[in-house]
Image: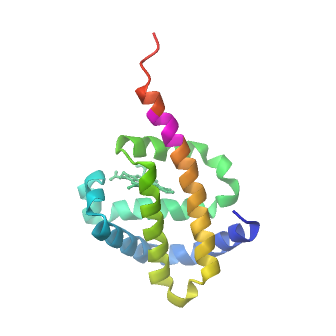
Amino acid sequence: MLTNQMQIVKATVPVLQKHGLEITRVFYEQMLTEHPELKAQFDPEAQKDGSQSRRLAGAILAYAANIDRLDQLTAGVDKIAYRHVDVNVLPEQYPIVGKHLLGAIKTVLGEAATPEILDAWAAAYGQLADILIGREKAIYAEQLEPAAV
Ligand code: HEM
């Protein structure tokens, strides 16, 4: 990720958070319309009251705000990774979430979402996704290993 992309991401976090609710609503609605099979992985109660979409997209925005010091967020990353393994999140699902998150940012911000801003957010999401995918891979592997006696 380029330095100026990090700056763009940090600079645009406040405006995205301001529209956070709308972005997360559009994100979730569009993603589950296109990928109804994902519904099974999400808690139905949390889907109904909208708290799930706030959690997932909200977390992505929050992490992106700290994109230049992700190494300090290990505890948070671990918590998400364990939860993801619980609900069987797979690496190939990351591009789906990424596509719809970017799509929602674009829809909600309209012309304010310049190509530079969208590219910077795509890069930030990719970086977060790589960290989580790596951690989850290790946790899945741990769980497959026979218990050491
Ligand atoms: C960079 C990408 C992502 C971030 C930052 C992220 C973040 C989070 C966070 C913060 C939680 C809540 C953890 C907790 O309960 O403590 C969560 C849960 C969850 N995430 Fe992700 N996530 C990402 C990608 C994905 C992807 C690709 C999927 C695949 C469909 C996914 C599906 C879920 C599900 C199903 C839950 C549990 C929801 C529930 O309790 O209903 N996430 N995620």
State the scheme by which the image is colored: rainbow
Above-or-below relation of 10 to 117: above
Which sits in the foreground, 145 or 72?
A: 145
- Residues in magenta? 135-140
For the N terminus, the quadrant is bottom right
Lateral position of residue 53 relative to residue 132, left or right: left
Extreme residue in the front direction = 92
Where in the figure is residue 122, as x and y percent of width and height?
Answer: 57, 68
Tell me where residue 12 sits by quadrant: bottom right
User: Which residue is painted at 41% across and 44% down in the image?
Assistant: 83
Where in the figure is residue 63, as x and y percent of width and height?
Answer: 57, 58
Tell me where residue 64 sits by quadrant: bottom right
Extreme residue in the right direction = 3
For the C terminus, the quadrant is top left
Where in the figure is residue 14, as x and y percent of width and height?
Answer: 59, 74
Where in the figure is residue 146, as x and y percent of width and height?
Answer: 42, 19
Lateral position of residue 60 relative to residue 8, left or right: left
Above-or-below relation of 63 to 22: above
Lateral position of residue 149 relative to residue 119, left or right: left
User: Which residue is painted at 41% across and 46% down in the image?
Assistant: 84
| Magenta-span inclusion, residue 44 | no
User: Which residue is painted at 51% across and 47% down in the image?
Assistant: 133
